[in-house]
Amino acid sequence: MSVALDFYVQRDSWLHRLDPRVKLWGMLLGLITVFVAPHLEVQIALLIGLHALLLCNHVPWAVLGRLWRQMALLIVLILVLQPFFAPSGTLLVALGPLRLTSSGLLEAARLATRAMVIAFTVGALLFTTDQRALVQACVRLGLPYTWGLTFSLTLRFLPAIQQLFVTVREAQVARGWVAEGNLFRRLREYLPVLVAVIIGTLRMSDRLTLALAARGMAGSTPRTVWRDLRMRPADWGACFGITLAFGVLLLWGI
């Protein structure tokens, strides 16, 4: 199984066609709203609204459910541990020094909902924006081109390195290699695999360096793009609408 660093769900919807800079602005305002408006009702409304937004833009339930499953452990830990760290409020259960109160349960629900809102706010950007457009938007917003290229290459080659590790490990297993024993012995057994992966990664980076040099990446001339980002009237309208909604939610949360 390879690492999936690309969460983009290819669909034809207005949110997918929206300029990625507008979506970055919306994500930033959404994250600010999560922390500035602490009321549980606001958090629940944001979570429901994010689900409705993604579903209306043809992001399938399976993708949303996968994000819920990935966040499940964190949510369970918050719901189990957090109630005992807010001793104020009506006492419900006392287990020695641990005191479960109504305020603790409310705080746990608030923090768990906030974590899910943060996850789906970032997910709304990643599910509807491909990596190329996201990196290009960051560059247009002032990120140095070399940094954007590094970020793009990282997203591209980390799964390739992980797949190289799987290939080397499976080749060793086919030759009778088995990692057994305690943790330290297993780590020693994995040394030949790691050496092979490091050598393969160095060869991959060498080929990448030659490919970039052949394309003139070492030069200082201004970079050009095939499909540049341009703000359309719909993008400006969406930006205004997101800012207006942020103000309304902020006033409601306060």
Image: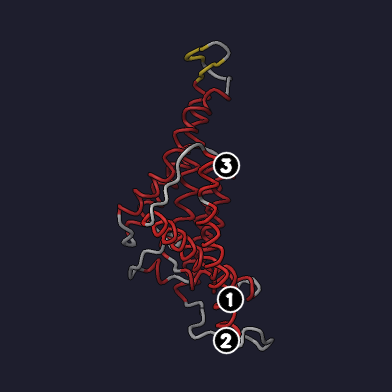
Q: Amino acid at mark 1?
A: Asp
* Viewer-side label of 2, 1: 1
Residue 192 rendering spot, x and y as whole percentages: 52, 56
Q: Quadrant of residue 141?
A: bottom right
Q: Secondary structure at mark 1?
A: helix
5 left or right of 251? Answer: left
Q: Amino acid at mark 3?
A: Ile
Q: Residue furthest front?
A: 176
**Mark 3, residue position:** 254
2 and 1 marks in contact (CB < 8 Å): no
Residue 223 rendering spot, x and y as whole percentages: 61, 85
3 and 1 marks in contact (CB < 8 Å): no
Residue at image position (69%, 86%) is 220
Residue at image position (54%, 60%) is 243
The C terminus: image quadrant = top right
Q: Quadrant of residue 4?
A: bottom left
**Mark 1, residue position:** 206
Among numbered discs 3 and 1, the one appearing first in the sequence: 1
1 left or right of 31? Answer: left
**Front-lying residue, 187 or 140:** 187
Q: Residues within 10 Å of mark 2 (few under 14, many from 20)?
A: few
How far is mark 3 from mark 1, CA to CA?
Answer: 55 Å
Disc number at residue 224? 2
Q: Is residue 192 above or below residue 251?
A: below
Q: Amino acid at mark 2?
A: Thr
Q: Secondary structure at mark 3?
A: loop
